[in-house]
Image (spheres, rainbow, N blue to C red):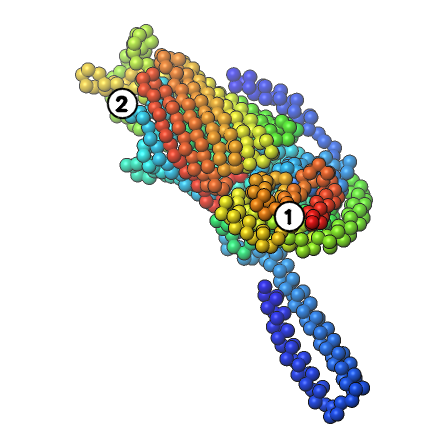
Amino acid sequence: MRVVMRIARSAAVALPALLAGTQAVSQSGTVPSATDLTAEIQALKLEYEARIRALETQLSTIEAKSRAVEREAASPVRRAKSTLDNAFNPSIGIVLDGRYASFSAEESAIPGFATGHESERAPEGLSLGHSEVTASGNIDDKFRGNLTLGLGAHPGEATEVELEEAYVQTLPGAGLPEGMRIKTGRALWTFGYLNEQHAHGDDFADRPLPYRAFLDNTFNDDGVELSFVLPSALYSEVGGGLFRGDDTPFGGSDNGLRARSVYARIGGDIGRDAAWRIGGYLLDGKSLNRGGGGHAHGHEEVAHEEEHEDEHEEEHEDEHAHEEVHEDEHGEDFAGFFSGGAFSGDTQLYGIDVRFAVAPTGNARESEVVLQAEYFWRKEDGTYALAEEEEDGMEHLEELRTDSIAHGWYIQGVYKPLPRWRIGARYAWLSPPDGAEIDHDPHAFGMMVDWTNSEFGRVRLQYNHEALDGHEKDNQFILQYVMSLGAHAAHSF
Amino acid sequence: MSRHLARALLAALAVIVPACAAADARVFACEPEWAALAGEIGGDNVTVYSATHGRQDAHYIRARPSLIAQVRRADIVFCSGAELEVGWLPLLMERGARREVQPGQPGHLMAADHVEVMERPERIDRSLGDIHPSGNPHVHLDPDNVARLAVELAGRLARVDPANEGAYRSRLADFQARWGTATKRWRARAEGLRGMKVVVHHAAWAYLLGWTGLDRVATLERTPGVPPTASHLRRLVERVRTTSADAILLAPHHRGDAADWLSQRTGVPVVELPFTVGGRDEASDLFALFDVTLTLLEEANNRP
């Protein structure tokens, strides 16, 4: 645009000059003859041509100059200059999550499992879900850092800031063997499919039952993890970690190195437009008075127990007597120990995940089918301690010795028929710890439909039918929005 | 139990690792056009893998396990750049890629860094849709850009695989000769298309329009990355009628419904161009890509 205006200006200057030139020529002759006229016209013509040539050179210089300016603007050096003041800032991402929920049942608890705050049913009515702020960036050529704060707004309570992730990981330039990466701090560690991703990336408004029961939604303990992508044609990755042992499925770490993990997974393509991944995982560790909710919310149970420390001491001698009573007597409420007690002992949690995605046209953004299933198997060997009020009004700490197995799975399918619309269904099932003697297997069915305006904004309607205990069924409706601002993580498989 | 698992892992390692040794230079190309170019310059000395195929939209690709495995073994990562692959390539690079293919290394070749990028936005805001702050990344539809990248790629290949430098240089010379002749032919054909009025979908055709002199009279997707709205399409009908457009251009990875709708109401034909190598069966290599594209445009332009 600017170029055009400059050309116009030069033309405006040149035109009067040309006209002036014509006048000068016509005034010079007194009685112009035909030959004079021809000569004059010839001279005029030459003059015009000269001037036009001059103009043309002028024009091309201007054009060349403007091209140079454009090139300069386009060059990376120039760009860096204009954004230098914040080029080194970490990228910031914010996720806004809000919902309206309606439930048919008053209470919602999974019998036989001590679930914490995180995995509880969302508050009824309008509420904010999990708002998130993430800052991440490269520290130098060897390390990358990430900090994610989860802001939990529970109605009637002060807004709670949870440090979801705060980790440092090595970059490929760190000098480790090719394909190896070390991550340390607090992170959403590698276990199953969903654990590694933030809840707002899920296909449903809530986590499936096995995640709620076995992990209190996520395992994000403090620790260090090493992973190794093998140089094979088929994708294969192995890894393992050491953790503090303070987050569900563990809790109450005393020496800060009580849990470890190993995992392996493989994946590949089927044809051009379908992909799969299968993984196997193990979390193994010790708990010491693990309450319901792990490190973030789980200290209430422990505190509660300490209040009754005196009773505990008195009871201590009778511990064995109690144990025997519980193990022999029928009709005793064993489930209460598992649901509300503090666990001390060994936990092994195995997981398997399978994911299969197919996009009929190759473009997952247009249309896609994703099937996903996970299976968790947990063995707990130790004791559950529960404070119980006796007839004399005093509270006693009772213990239950247990070596029990619990397991659960879910399977889900999500179909995207149109670029903006997805529908999904999920079924989840749990088998409570065998020692808890619970007849009913909690299970839940969910359906969702969501609408995605762009990559950054999504609105979802979900229906859940939960039969967690043998008595009451819970019909839930959840209307949710998830919107993200700023930098957002890449699309993982 | 965990000891068994560890033993099983070691056994798996013993099977997988020996299968990984490779003699060739491996090129991981993000798009088929760069895979084709790598094939031209690298010939038998390279193993080329294309992360996407001709009917895929390279903006939206999942960082699938197979891509992690491929990028893990690559000696050169050859992509369009300018944020085209921003949704998935960084994840692959971070997850599996070797140090030699990381940004700033000879093994990291982004096409947009080596040509003049068009349409660099003055204002950047998410409300403008899925825009590329670094400008239009679809640089391959200008034959001069392909020629520049052929030179750059040959240099990179020579650096990562010095033993075969001679082969890369001679193949480059051969390619340059053939490409130069073809480019002259294409330019002559493009003269006949100058001023042809087209409706485009997204910014995919900016470079093609640039050198052929086609005239863009309307854009189907008003906001990049956001499908066209009904009201925008209604306004388009009027615009397309008054400007008497010659064709509605469509890439294989674009949904045709909006284009078809517009075509039905205006009588302007939809022309599905290959966009990249493999975008149509006939567009089997880079030369065919340009030949087919020009043929299709000429057919639409010569329509009575």
Q: Residue at x 69, y 87 (%)?
A: A24
Q: Please tell me whether mark 2 sits on a helix, a strand or a loop.
A: helix
Task: Name the one closer to the observer, B190 or A336.
Answer: B190
Q: Position of residue B10 (x, y in %)?
A: 61, 21
Q: Which mark is residue B247?
A: 1
Labels 1 and 2 within one chain: no
Q: Chain of mark 1?
A: B
Q: Residue at x 39, y 13 (%)?
A: A434
Q: Please tell me whether mark 1 sits on a helix, a strand or a loop.
A: strand
| Amino acid residing under circle 2 | Glu
- Decide: few, some or many residues near mark 1? Use Cα within 10 Å; few <14, some 14-19, many ≥20: many
Asked whether, in this view, residue A341 is left or right of residue A176, the answer is: left
Asked whether, in this view, residue A40 is left or right of residue B31, the answer is: right
Q: How many marks?
A: 2
- Decide: few, some or many residues near mark 2? Use Cα within 10 Å; few <14, some 14-19, many ≥20: some
- Height in image: A425 above or below B288? above
Cβ atoms under marks 1 and 2 closer than 8 Å: no
Q: Is residue B1 visible?
A: yes
Distance between the Cα atoms at labels 1 and 2? 83 Å
Q: Position of residue A87 (x, y in %)?
A: 52, 51
Q: Is residue A240 visible?
A: no
